[in-house]
């Protein structure tokens, strides 16, 4: 006859065996480095990691092995890979990590990935992520009240007006630079160029945007959500203009920003993992669209920012390369080329010519 202590020892032994089996299964799975940035633009991935098995009904979800560090990627109830998370400071750093073969998959701004592909980095855009969520922010007590007032301030200034950005190939920086050039202004990155109208200052990463604004190092900053929202909720700054509202009217509305990316080696050797990664982003993105405030709060918590900043999110997540997205991507391509940002395979390419160099859309059938 078993006694309670014997039953307890058997139970503990069973739990230990199950734990060892789970560790053994995890050890046999292929592991891939997966990058993202601390921005609510990457909410679907952060929400997927946070909610885990709550997304079981989506058919693809993440199961934590080490919270915020390592996750099993589950597809149709079966673990197919381990995703080891890598936090990058910017899209340009993400592109560099792909070039150095330190990333297999990731999320970054489309412009940074374009620049990396132009340089010959073997990677492809495998899915769109979102639109909107980019803004120009000035100090709370700034006399500037609109885009027009900024243009007048620039014209009246005897020296270049300083505007900070977080990454040289970030979508917010490229959109702002394009709008300034279209307004007939001379823009420079060279601090010694005193004849320029606007000096764009590289602040290196998103965490420096608001600190530099507060310290008066720049007169404005441009960046992705949630930093404009944080500036408002903390009383640091105010949104001068959402980039989607910049002139000419309608050109920058619903503009693409971040994308899902995979290395060409990853696509060739592990297409089933790439397909599950794309399905995860797409399906959780749809959930985020349906639950914007909850998704915003979760992403803000991940980043360590006030939940009210996340609730102000205006992001729209996409599941396909729709016509609007392609038009926006084409605009980016033409702007970057006109600014002589390309010197490699994308130089002077039309979107029709560039699309097979940039995009692999074979993974977007998330029903499979």
Image: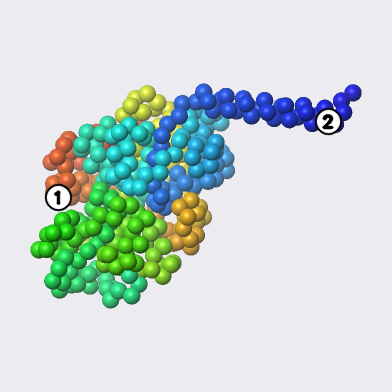
Whether 245 is drawn above or below 34: the answer is below
| Residue beneath the point at 44% across and 49% down | 43
Circles 1 and 2 in contact, beta carbons < 8 Å: no
Residue tagged 1: 339
Whether 98 is drawn above or below 183: the answer is above
For mark 1, give the secondary structure: loop
Observer able to see residue 155 = no
Q: Nearer the viewer, residue 111 or 128?
A: 111
Mark 2 Cα shell of 10 Å, populated few (<14), some (14-19), many (≥20): few
| 172 left or right, relative to 313 | left
Q: Residue 66 at what x, y percent from top left?
A: 54, 38
| Residue beneath the point at 19% across and 72% down | 153
| 5 left or right, relative to 278 | right
| 332 left or right, relative to 10 | left
Q: Residue 52 at what x, y percent from top left?
A: 55, 41
How far is mark 1 from mark 2, CA to CA? 75 Å
The single residue placed furthest to the left in the displayed view is 195
Residue 186: assigned label: none
Observer able to see residue 208 = yes
Residue tagged 2: 5
Q: Residue 246 at what x, y percent from top left?
A: 25, 62
Q: Quadrant of residue 198?
A: bottom left
Q: Quadrant of the C terminus?
A: top left
Q: Quadrant of the N terminus?
A: top right
Q: Residue 214 at what x, y percent from top left?
A: 34, 67
**Which of disc 2 and disc 1 is earlier in sequence?**
2
Whether 112 is drawn above or below 137: the answer is above
């Amino acid at each position: 006859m078993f006694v309670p202590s014997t039953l307890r020892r058997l139970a503990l032994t069973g739990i230990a065996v199950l734990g060892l089996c789970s560790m053994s299964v995890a050890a046999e799975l292929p592991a891939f480095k997966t990058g993202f940035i601390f921005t609510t633009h990457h909410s679907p991935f952060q929400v997927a990691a946070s909610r885990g098995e709550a997304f079981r009904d989506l058919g693809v979800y993440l199961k934590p092995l080490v919270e915020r560090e390592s996750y099993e990627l589950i597809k149709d109830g079966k673990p197919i890979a381990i995703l080891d998370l890598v936090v990058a400071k910017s899209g340009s750093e993400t592109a560099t990590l792909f070039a150095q073969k330190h990333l297999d998959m990731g999320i970054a701004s489309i412009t940074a990935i374009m620049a990396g592909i132009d340089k010959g980095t073997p990677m492809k855009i495998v899915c769109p992520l979102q639109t909107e969520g980019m803004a120009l922010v000035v100090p709370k007590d700034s006399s500037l009240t609109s885009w027009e007032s900024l243009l007048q301030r620039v014209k009246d200034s005897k020296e270049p007006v300083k505007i900070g950005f977080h990454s040289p190939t970030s979508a917010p920086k490229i959109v702002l630079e394009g709008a300034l050039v279209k307004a007939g202004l001379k823009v420079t990155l060279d601090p010694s160029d005193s004849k320029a109208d606007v000096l764009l200052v590289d602040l290196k990463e998103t965490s420096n945007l608001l600190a530099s604004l507060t310290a008066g190092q720049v007169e404005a900053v441009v960046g992705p959500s949630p930093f404009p929202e944080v500036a408002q909720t903390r009383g640091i700054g105010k949104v001068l203009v959402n980039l989607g509202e910049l002139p000419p009217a309608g050109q920058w509305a619903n503009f693409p920003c971040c994308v899902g990316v995979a290395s060409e080696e990853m696509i060739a050797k592990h297409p089933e993992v790439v397909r599950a990664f794309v399905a995860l982003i797409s399906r959780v993105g749809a959930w985020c669209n349906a639950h914007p405030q909850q998704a915003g709060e979760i992403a803000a918590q991940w980043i360590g920012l006030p939940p009210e900043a996340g609730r102000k999110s205006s992001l729209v997540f996409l599941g396909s390369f729709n016509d609007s997205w392609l038009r926006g991507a084409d605009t980016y391509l033409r702007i970057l080329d006109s600014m002589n940002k390309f010197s490699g395979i994308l130089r002077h390419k039309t979107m029709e010519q560039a699309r097979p160099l940039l995009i692999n859309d074979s993974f977007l059938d998330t029903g499979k």
